[in-house]
Image (tube, helix red, strand yellow):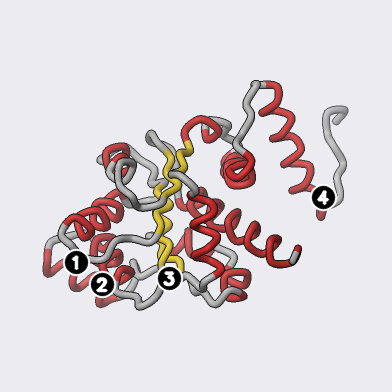
Amino acid sequence: MDNIEYIKPGEIEKRSFEIISEELEKRGIVLPKEQELITKRAIHTSADFDYADTLCYSENAVEKALELIKNGADIVTDTNMGLSGINKKVLAAFGGEAHCYMAEETIAMEAKERNVTRATVSMEKGLSLKKPVIFAIGNAPTALISLYEQMMNGKRKPDFIIGVPVGFVNVEAAKELFLDTDVPYIINRGRKGGSNIAAAICNALLYIARDNLEEK
């Protein structure tokens, strides 16, 4: 019991981020200022400091994501777990909605008829939205592959990609697809990721957007 810290419930997250900052300093890791809160929230969600090395940001990625949020962008994710983790109240304050189409019966039927994954059909539906869309992919590499193929076939280009699917089959290759495109992204290289990380990155961006608004 000597090692137990007694912290008020409302201060636990604050203390967690203090510990993360201390650990990063001990490891000699200095995060770029504009990326700091996003990477720290991924670490906070996973207790995995590898994200300090593997999270990749396209040029001005955070600035572009914040601009999309400010202009009422929706978020489309590939799991209901990711959907449940996104702070929809903050997103709604900017005029945005969060969507996951994976469990819809019509999506399942079309995927079966076409012999493709539900993630593929879900991403096509996300691309059909008549507003800016941030795609937050935490589980299905086929979602990223579908978005890339649509773009290469002359269809709509994704406005922003959060690409953090987790796993072993096609995961690394799917993430690599967008690294050499002009689509703004936050992508985690390697096998790690997950719906919780996708939601954490979304929330980090939403909280920054909210805080920026409150400061004005």
Looking at the figure, which quarter contains the N terminus?
Answer: top right
Image position of 140 with respect to 49: above or below? below
Task: Report crowding for label 4: few under 14, some 14 to 19, many 20 or more residues within 10 A (C-alpha).
Answer: few
Q: Position of residue 22 (x, y in %)?
A: 74, 29
Label at residue 11: 4
Task: Report crowding for label 3: few under 14, some 14 to 19, many 20 or more residues within 10 A (C-alpha).
Answer: many
Task: Report crowding for label 2: few under 14, some 14 to 19, many 20 or more residues within 10 A (C-alpha).
Answer: some
Three-letter residue code for mark 3: His
Alpha-carbon distance for marks 3 and 4?
Answer: 31 Å
Three-letter residue code for mark 4: Glu
Of 165 and 93, which appears nearest the observer? 93
Q: Position of residue 13 (x, y in %)?
A: 74, 48
Q: Residue at x 82, y 50 (%)?
A: 11
N-terminal label among 2 and 3: 3
Q: Position of residue 121 (x, y in %)?
A: 24, 66
Three-letter residue code for mark 2: Ile
Alpha-carbon distance for marks 2 and 1?
Answer: 6 Å
Q: Which residue is drawn at 26% across and 63% down?
A: 118
Q: Is mark 3 on a helix, strand or loop?
A: strand
Task: Report crowding for label 1: few under 14, some 14 to 19, many 20 or more residues within 10 A (C-alpha).
Answer: some
Alpha-carbon distance for marks 4 and 1?
Answer: 46 Å
Whether residue 202 sits left or right of residue 191 in the image: it is right
Disc 2 target residue: 107
Disc 1 target residue: 111
Looking at the figure, which quarter contains the C terminus?
Answer: bottom right
